[in-house]
Amino acid sequence: MRRKEFEVMDPQELEAFLREMSFGFLGTTGEDGWPRLTPLNFVYTGECLYFHGSKIGEKMTQLKAHPKVTFAVAKEYSIIPSYFTDPKLACPATAFFKSVLIKGYAEPVTELEEKAAALAAFMQKLQPEGGYAPIDPADAEYAGQLKATVVVRITPHEISAKYKFGQNMKSSAFERITSGLQERQGELDEETIALMKAYCPHHRE
């Protein structure tokens, strides 16, 4: 059961996270009835999620037969060792993270203009420094590529999120963990402390 203290319901916050991330896992149904997970890059724009690929292959066959899909995105922040809060037991060891799960309907995009817009959003995310000509269906060099590339749109039916940053912990554990993170100074530890203070109800600044 998903614990309510970890749920995030703010649509703007969810959208900001999806726009930040570029990698997730597509869940489809295989011909044998077994679930399939495919890691891929994505972009979220216009309240829809897009990915691209080849016209042929297992993934496209699955989507044609079963357009209902799930898509999961997650980002791990700090690993929290048990000894931050307990000198003996391993039980408190955990990790803090953000995750979003989308249930939706997948279909190939047919309009070249929408394809171009989705791929332009990809480039803005993955290559923000530029260094390429704008993606324009009227450009003969792009037109053939757009026709040959499949861009799939996932229209969300339901979006849910779980952010775990110690929302359920007591003040004493909160203080010990933030102190441990400050002392450790790992890559994402300062950001984790800020998120703990933002999301823990009795510690919000």
Image (cartoon, rainbow, N blue to C red):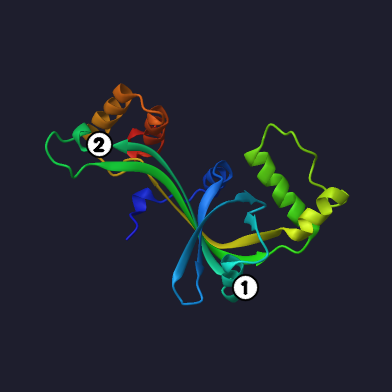
Spatial separation of the CA atoms under disc 2 and disc 1: 45 Å
Is residue 147 among what the camera can see? yes
Q: How would you rate the neighbour count of disc 2 (Cα within 10 Å): few for under 14, some for 14-19, many for 20 or more?
A: some
Q: Residue at x 83, y 54 (%)?
A: 143
Residue 79 locus on image (x, y percent):
32, 38
Residue 133 locus on image (x, y percent):
80, 39
Foreground mark, 2 or 1, reads 1
Q: Residue at x 63, y 40 (%)?
A: 126
Residue 198's quadrant in the figure? top left
Task: Residue lying at the far left in this picture: please name it.
Answer: 88
Residue 103 locus on image (x, y percent):
52, 63
* Amino acid bearing label 2: Pro
Residue 194's quadrant in the figure? top left
Residue 117 locus on image (x, y percent):
74, 50
Circle number at residue 187: none
* Amino acid bearing label 1: Lys
| Nearer to the camera, 17 or 11 | 17
Depicted 88 relative to depicted 148: above or below: above
Secondary element at tag 1: helix
Which residue corresponds to mark 2? 81
**Would you say 167 lies left or right of 42 here?**
left
Is residue 205 among what the camera can see? no
Task: Residue lying at the far front in this picture: please name it.
Answer: 57
Which residue corresponds to mark 1? 64
Q: Name the quadrant of the N terminus.
A: bottom left
Q: Name the quadrant of the C terminus.
A: top left
Q: Residue at x 31, y 28 (%)?
A: 181
